[in-house]
Amino acid sequence: MKLVIIGGVAGGASAATRARRLSESAEIVILERGPDVSFANCGLPYYIGGEIAAREKLIVTTPSLLRRRYRIDVRTRTEAIAVDRRARTVTARNLADGSTTELSYDALILAPGAVPVKPPIPGADLPGVYTLRNLDDVDRIKAVVDQGVEHAVIVGAGFIGLELAENFLRRGLRTTVVELQDQVLPVVDREMTAPFVEALVSRGAEVLLQNSIDSIHASGGRLTLALKSGGTLEAGLVVLGIGLRPENQLAAQAGLDVGPRGGVQVDERMRTSDPSIYAVGDVVETRDYVTGTPTQVPLAGPANRQGRIAADNIFGRESRYRGTQGTSIVGFFDQTLAATGLTQKALERVGTAFFKVYVHANHHAGYYPGAKPLSIKLLAEPGSNRLLGAQVVGTEGVANRINVLAMAIQAMMTVHDLQEVELAYAPQFGSAKDPVNMAGFVAANVADGLYPQIHVEDLESETYSQALILDVRTPKEFQAGAIPAAVNMPIDELRERLGELPRDRPVVAYCQVGMRGYMATLILREAGLDAYNLGGGYKTYRLHHPATNQHA
Amino acid sequence: MKLVIIGGVAGGASAATRARRLSESAEIVILERGPDVSFANCGLPYYIGGEIAAREKLIVTTPSLLRRRYRIDVRTRTEAIAVDRRARTVTARNLADGSTTELSYDALILAPGAVPVKPPIPGADLPGVYTLRNLDDVDRIKAVVDQGVEHAVIVGAGFIGLELAENFLRRGLRTTVVELQDQVLPVVDREMTAPFVEALVSRGAEVLLQNSIDSIHASGGRLTLALKSGGTLEAGLVVLGIGLRPENQLAAQAGLDVGPRGGVQVDERMRTSDPSIYAVGDVVETRDYVTGTPTQVPLAGPANRQGRIAADNIFGRESRYRGTQGTSIVGFFDQTLAATGLTQKALERVGTAFFKVYVHANHHAGYYPGAKPLSIKLLAEPGSNRLLGAQVVGTEGVANRINVLAMAIQAMMTVHDLQEVELAYAPQFGSAKDPVNMAGFVAANVADGLYPQIHVEDLESETYSQALILDVRTPKEFQAGAIPAAVNMPIDELRERLGELPRDRPVVAYCQVGMRGYMATLILREAGLDAYNLGGGYKTYRLHHPATNQHA
């Protein structure tokens, strides 16, 4: 068996080492255009910021180790320039001397990854304007930062954009983030990003939403960016982080099937439309685990697993990729935001019915010092009550909960299942009723029709525009901030004061997180009122209406 | 509906509030022997140590809140002394004035909890000898510590014993832990406790294993404990933490079915042998989630869920308890140990076949600063490859991984499923191949027969007593500590030096964590040698043969 692998980072390196472990005799060649294989892509921003101090830490595996231990013929600075499917050969160009070689293969794995999208604007190729994808990029950006540049503009407020913002701020740069959408982290739902916007602003970043760059000009060693909204930004450094494009040229030239968004199409075995050619990692179009529809999600974990699965199938082992959930996590200083499965906006885009709940809870028992609040949003399918997606934001315990919820989605659990899962509890690690259980309780109550819930966005609707908004918290909580036009009536007085409440229009009860509002709703309905609980209470309201205006 | 609940802590309080939410009109009475309802049982040791500074933090819910908000008739310092099943009445004694009342019920929930076992030894009732179960207990123990007692003896190295040890050490007490078994934390497998023993010793605790107390004598304000092994201990304070006994007297008197270990028997609806009487929490015998066999596991999470489930069924809602996995976690300073599902010793006790793997990995990407090692032990069922149990030990990320593995068991996942689960990765939160994925990879390789693995305990067996033990790590790693009689041959030299290896006896390869040993085993087998990989490598060997002798 002669196996050629194009690309030696996450998916390619995983495929190569798995292949060697499955066959000591196979001939395995890696063609890698760059100087490195298997580097820590996700660590690049932190090397710029100095959290990762030594550049060599970013090298996960060296070509020499792959040669020595795995007998893999690693050719770096070597670009695959053509695939002849009939002859089963790859033409490779040595980037040092320009010479070309032809390699035959029995099986070929395409793992070339994806490249940052460069927007088609004047000046996008100027010196000082960068994208961040590999070690060459990071060296260039770090050199500029090390030279003491004062102001950086980051175009795109996605994962890499926000990670770069943290690290530029750490280095003392004035930092502006420009984002086309009306929110940071556009892959999650907008309200869940409110704590991030607040953190960005409080750390001194400038955030420009619903804005973009029309052009970039260089003069006197500085870059001037013309904003779509009018006005300009001056910067010593610009990083474009607006998205990734699959490196599909070779696949397209070879006539392999490529999806509408550019991903190489593969089956569950990671096999392309040519049964001798596999593709893995950021270059492929896979299936969304929840919906089964095509998706393109550039994530390191899936890339590694896909590489392994391709190798398994090449060496005759039954192994299938189940699709990508899109489990992801991002930090910005002490804030953490994570998601798995589908978002509300994704569901709305395709018109899939859903119901949702918000839970705000402490990351461990509140009675133990150091408990930090986190917020969970669950999306579930009406009828089946299957979990469709989840998002978690907070400062501690976020990875823990998103992993639990990712497992729930993987296992196709329902919101009722979430009530019953048995998680670890000691006061410094969790709660007897874990936030995930709590989310299950609330969602199961909604699913079971135990009480009617409405959402912050419903308050604007005609149905509830005349409703009495009833704040059932304590007067002290009420005075510290409440929904406009709300009337305060603490829950513990409610049963005695029912006569004060209107019977000719809806009453929307709310508390801080939704629990007292739920009890209040039950009391009011028992008394014959047309009552509703505002899901997630005032905390959810504040996510939708943050103190920090996202449209600054 | 008139509902009487005996016991107002975890299960009882959960049942009562759920009941109110399900029915605004029900009459709900809680009879609680103690002065408090719903206190933070699991926080008690940390109040003694001062981590939890204010006593009121330990009060989760007050009787007055339950009365005010939930209209629950809470009667504290009131003991249920008899149940008349035919008349459906409970006789309650007011502990303040000794008066008795009779309460009728339509449904009765028993949630009296469990009490610490007092060993039948002379002196177990002396002043200065305590158990720890409620706020009265914690007040007594804290008073003695506050008085400046110098030496504490903890009998029993279970969860509470170790949590107390941490807190006594924090307060500057000389602390001795005496445990009957040959290990601390007897509910998990012995080798996984090695880091805890090391931490105990390094923090200054004295640990006496396979030992017990024959008697306790008081003289001159001090307690003298006679050890089974001979010799004595002097102490100003003794805490007995050797186990819990279900408070089943009332149930037994009422003729309800009680299991052989004392737990009140219930069905999936938490209903006892009398359909009007439910039982929840530490008093019940439930089913083990994995095996379906009867079990008694005193945990706060299950108690809360059981309370909720009992209330659901009483008010006509279909709701079933699925059994207890025994997910648990304990900290000792920075060490954390957690378990879910069955242990190896539990499997061996009942003679269930299993296979196991050990994985040692960093809690997040190694290239990001602050990565801490953790160790995972997985137990799975041969054939089905279903996960049976898991244990995790380390200083960071332990709760996260045990929760993921608890979800895997809840979902009845196989080791192959663990390979594919998609967990959150950014360098400060996880790894592209999460430790749980790694454990899945290793276990699936074993399940698929990709290489033969043996374990540390097999090295002692006749089959491998003549084997060559081949350390394939670097000379530097080898010199820093190796398995006795091992020969060093670094993996990267292996293919060239095959001729030096014996063909007349087995070769057991090992490295630091098992990965290089796995590759070495494949190379050796390809070359025709009778090679095996030592599962989990030298790190697993060190868990079995720790530097700190557990039999001190």
Image (spheres, coloured by chain):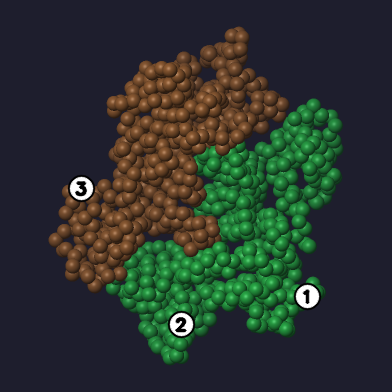
Chain colours: A green, B brown
- Camera-near label (1 vs 3) is 1
Residue A307: x and y in percent read: 43, 68
Viewed as shown, does residue B89 lie left or right of B64?
left
Q: Amino acid at mark 2?
A: Arg
Q: Secondary structure at mark 2?
A: loop
- Chain where mark 1 sits: A
Q: Quadrant of the C terminus of chain B?
A: top left
| Alpha carbon separation for disc pair 1 and 3 | 76 Å
Q: Are marks 1 and 3 on the same chain?
A: no
- Label at residue A77: 2
B406 in relation to B9, above or below: below
Give the letter of the chain under mark 2: A
Q: Which residue is mark 3?
A: B461
- Side of B199 where A517 appears, left or right: right
Same chain, labels 1 and 2: yes
For label 2, count other residues whose C-alpha is less than 10 Å away and answer few (under 14), some (14-19) or many (20+).
some
